Every structure is written in C-alpha cells, then in structure tokens.
Amino acid sequence: MLKLAGEDSGAREKIELIAYSPGKQDTGDLEAGTHTIVPTSRPAIGSAQYSASLTLPKPDDARLAVKRIAARLSVNIAGLGTATHVYCSVRVDVDDTDHQLFNMDWTSTGAKLDAVDAHSGALSTIFDLLKDGQAHTFYFLFWADAANQATIDVVQLWEAVGTCDTGGVDVATLSHTGWVGIVGNCASKEGTGTSYFIPKLVSGQVNVARLVTVNGGFGASVTPTPNFLIPGTCYFLMLGTVATDLNYIADIYLVLRSEQ
C-alpha cells in the first residue's frame, strides 16, 4: 500500500524474542571401571546394566517446532575373551521394540560409535517422548554369545535437537510472517567432523533457498545477526560430514518483527 507523507496506516511494528537453549544432554561415562558381560540373551530393562535419565527442554513458543532429535552412543569393548559377539540395546522408558533407540551387534574390540535420528518418519514413538520436555530414562542392555568373557569400559550417550545426517534435513521450523533475526550457537557438534546449520525458505534441498550457512564445531554461531523476510515458515536444516557425529542446536535466539 502507498502511504502518503503524514498518513498513518494504523499498522504498528511488533518485536518479539524466542529464546531456546536445548543444549546437549549427556549421560557421562556410565562405567567407572571395567564391566564383564554376563548375560547371553538380552536382559529386561529391570536388569539393565546401566540407566540414565535425561531431559531435553522443549521450546516455550509453539511457533518454534522441533522436527528431529539425534542421539549418539559410545561404547568401548575392552576385551572379547572367547566371545565373538557383543550386543547392545538402548531402550527409552519402555521395554519393547517401539522404544528401542539402538540395537547393536559388535564383533571386535575397541571404540564403537553410532548415531541415529528420531523423527516423525522413523523412531516416531521415541521422538514423541523425547520432544515433550519431560525426563526420560535410557536403559543400556548388554549381552554376548559367551558368558563372563567380554568386557566394556565406556558407556555414554548424548541427545540433542539435531541430526547425524550427512545429506541435510530439517531439525526445526519457525512459523512466522515478517522479519526474523537469528543468532546463537546453532552449528555445535559432538564428534570429529564439521557441522552445518542452514536456515531456508524451502524444506530440505540443501542448495535451494538458503538464507545463510553456518559451519564449524562446538559453539559455531550466527554472527553478526542477519535479518531475513520470512513468508510463513523458516526451515532450520542441519547436516554433518561424519555419520556418527551429533550435529545440534545448542541455543538459538530469534528476534521477530511483524506488523499488527
């Protein structure tokens, strides 16, 4: 609309802030020494060798929606003895396959890393749990094909709003019409590769409708604060260069400008 000098259209600028700091939730190393695996079949969660409760905060504002939660598992197999397989199942809250986050089968000693994404299209039961802002218990179940042979000395898990994907996926969305300024530690990682955070106007498609690209490691931030005009939805896409890394949003601050 053309506004003449001195004419008041009645519109007023509205400025809001959405602040979200989900961080990286970490069990720490649950094994202080060395553990010998006794069972030769998967134990129930009531007999889990390890368990830990983690809480991933949810956004306070419904306009910012979490679309992916990633988890990274680290286990070190110190020895096998006469065993040839070490198995690990990580389950969340409930002892069934719908609540199984990891299901591993290892056949050698040394450090074992794996990562997985939970979202509406895969591990959806777990995704719905982890995004609700409440505490959830992770149960770590170990067994081997020979009793009292295999040993482990590291068991650790991380979870965050993010992804282990190396191709690029939406981890969150912002519903807004108007200008938005973005700042924060948005391209953090747990791992050895490079993480990327890309606000976009189109879902997926890494090279289409990028607003800005942030890459780096822990604490890589969007600076200086860029401002973009959003026509309804902004997609926060992430990816990393190593498939076992956890690439995540540590914190994000969105300054929204609109007319009312």
Image (spheres, helix red, strand yellow):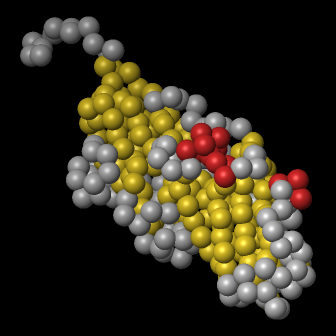
Q: Is residue 26 left or right of residue 246?
A: right
Residue 26, picture quadrant: bottom right
**Residue depicted at 16% across the width and 9% down the height:** 6
Q: Residue at x 29, y 57 (%)?
A: 206
* Image position, residue 140 (x, y; %): 78, 62
- Residue 241 seen from this side: yes
117 in relation to 107, above or below: above
Q: Is 185 or 13 nearer to us in this picture?
A: 185
Residue closer to the observer: 44 or 92: 44
Note whether 113 is above or below 81 in the view shown.
above
At a point 86% along the width and 76% down the height, the residue shown is 37
What is the x, y in percent for residue 51? Answer: 82, 57
**Residue 29, x across and y down, in percent:** 79, 69
Quadrant containing the C terminus in the rendered view: top left
* Quadrant in the rendering for residue 191: bottom right
Q: Is residue 158 left or right of residue 151?
A: left
